[in-house]
Structure formats: structure tokens, C-alpha cells
Image (tube, rainbow, N blue to C red):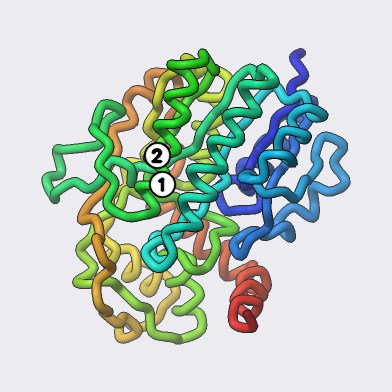
Amino acid sequence: MNKYKVLITGGAGFIGGNFVQYMVNKYPHYDIVNLDLLSYAGDLTKHIHLETKENYSFVQADIADRETIMSLFEKGKFDFVVHFAAESHVDRSITDPAIFVRTNVMGTQVLLDAAKAFGITKFVHVSTDEVYGELDFDPTVFFTEDTPLQPNSPYSASKASSDLFVRAYYETYGLPMNITRCSNNYGPYHFPEKLIPLTISKVLNDQKVPVYGDGRNIRDWLHVWDHCAAIDLVLHEGVSGEVYNVGGHNERTNLEVVKTIISTLGKSEDLIEFVTDRLGHDKRYAIDPSKLERLGWKPTYTFETGIAQTIKWYTDNAEWWQQILSNEAHK
């Protein structure tokens, strides 16, 4: 049985945090190291139950801090790096693009230098379908791995830049790598500024739910646990140098998502409040995941089963997101 040491960056965030739990529990013989800066969206309370596990440890560090990262890699002797750490909120990127360049581009380049210097076995870079830009409303057209990168927000531009650096380190230095590009994730421990957790929290508190524009923008929704399984497969079976798209085949307009949550919670659609549209708001994202499916992955959640499970989780764990909202309000 192979015993690997895995560095997961951004493991206090939403997707990275779920992946940390997935890996610690599925591979008790692996050493899982969670690296996170613990910025505003980083939360370690989700991992309290892991702190007694012998195969889990946490390091607080900034991925753009070259000296610290190099020292960590030298001591850590990692086999795998799974890189989630990123600034990810589009609205925040419109307000302050510079922090997105520092973390998402420069931070990724520092990690790549460390991975190259210390000869890791595989570097998996977790990206987003937003690097492809937008699709029109033709339901027969999807993003594939060959779709040109045409990012439309400072966030997606920073992610596209980091993708290109990862590719360049493979082509130039032979660094073993994969890039995954996922559709919109949802599920437990999602920071309550994003659409689904924001809507759930607002509806539970009988507050107005803001919907950009006319609410017709379409997203392809992927349950975070299906995403974790996909990354696990790519980490172990992905062909080095390849990009794999991860999509849920669950396209919904933003308005449909909001109405589903309101209906499930038995509240009135009068809570919906249409607000000025986001700058550069992409019309539609939709992924063709057939390449990953040929590798052996299939999503297990439909949107109906996944959103019901997610709403129940947020209802049952209100203390978690209420504390986060309280902390944000006092900053």
C-alpha cells in the first residue's frame, strides 16, 4: 500500500476544506497537510473533528511568501500538491484586482517553483470554468478542454493566468501536473457570500434575496463532494499534462436556484429583490465533462438531491454560518 504525503493549499476554504475531509477519511495511510493563510473566507472550525487524526496537520502560511513555502517543501518532502488556494469572489475582484494577482498568479508561481525544486510526483491545479469566458443561451454548446481562454472578470483573468503558468512549467520544466476546471460548486461549508448559501441564509432570516439583473444568467451546478471525487481520480489516474473539465450537467438560471430554495423552505417569492447587474456578468457557463467521464468519473448528485441536502445542512448547521456572518459584520 503506497503511503503518500499530500499538501492541500486552501484547505480552510470551501472546496479545499471538503477535499481535506475527503482525503483524510478515504486515505488514512496518507499524510494530509492543510496549508491556508486563514484570510476572511478561511475557517478551521470545519476541521475540529480532524485534529485528533494522526494523518492530518495544519500549517498557516501565505502561498506568495517564497521563503516560507520553500522551507515548507524542503522539510515536508511532499509527493502530491493539490492547489486550491485562491481569492475567488468575482465581486471582490472587481473592487480590488491586485490581491487576486498576488494570490492567484504570484502565489501559484511560488508553489510551482517549490514543486519543481523538490521534485514532487504530481501538481494538481484546481481552476474554474470561468477562464473560458461565457456561452450564449444555446443549450447544445458547452465548454470543452479545447475552448480558448477568454476570461471576463479580474478573478477569472487571474485564474487563467495561473493555469497558463502551470501549463508552462509542464512544457518548459517537465513538472508533472494536471489542471481541473469545474463548474459552480455548492454544498456544506460554503462561505455565505456566494449565491446558494447567501440565499439560504437570507431566506431563513426572512431577508430580501438580491438577484443580479433579470436572474437569467445560467450556471452549471456541481456538488462539492462530486468535485472531490473527480480531483481524487485526476490526482491518481490523470495523464500528466492534461486538463480535465468537471461539470455537473445541472444547468439552472440564478432565478431558478433562488426560487427552488425559497420553495423548499416554504417562504414567499416576495423575498426576491432584483438589483443592478454585476459588471461583466457572464451569461452562461456549461461544461462538457466527457473526457473526465472516460477516465472513470460520474457525478452522483442531481441538482434536486444535492440542493435538498445542502439546504438541510445549512438549516441543521445554522450556528456555523451565523458565526461567520457575525464575524464579517464586526470587521
Q: Residue furthest front?
A: 67
Q: Is residue 97 left or right of residue 231?
A: left
Is 87 on the left-hand or right-hand side of 35?
A: left
In the rendered image, residue 137, in percent from the top left (x then y), is placed at 13, 50
- Report crowding for label 2: few under 14, some 14 to 19, many 20 or more residues within 10 A (C-alpha): many
Identify which amino acid the numbered label 2 is placed on: Ser
- Which residue: 60% across, 45% down? 16
Q: Position of residue 202 (x, y in %)?
A: 46, 79
Question: Residue 296 occupies which quadrant of the picture?
Answer: top left
The one nearer the camera, 69 or 55, is 69
Q: Quadrant of the N terminus?
A: top right
Q: Position of residue 320 (x, y in %)?
A: 66, 69
Which residue was labeled with disc 1? 158
Residue at left offset 11%, top offset 45%: 138
Quarter the C terminus occupies: bottom right
Q: Which residue is mark 2?
A: 161
Question: Vertically, is 151 above or below 110?
Answer: below
Which secondary structure lies at badge 2? Answer: helix
Alpha carbon distance from label 1 to label 2: 5 Å
Q: Quadrant of residue 232?
A: top right
Asked if marks 1 and 2 touch (Cβ < 8 Å), the reply is: yes
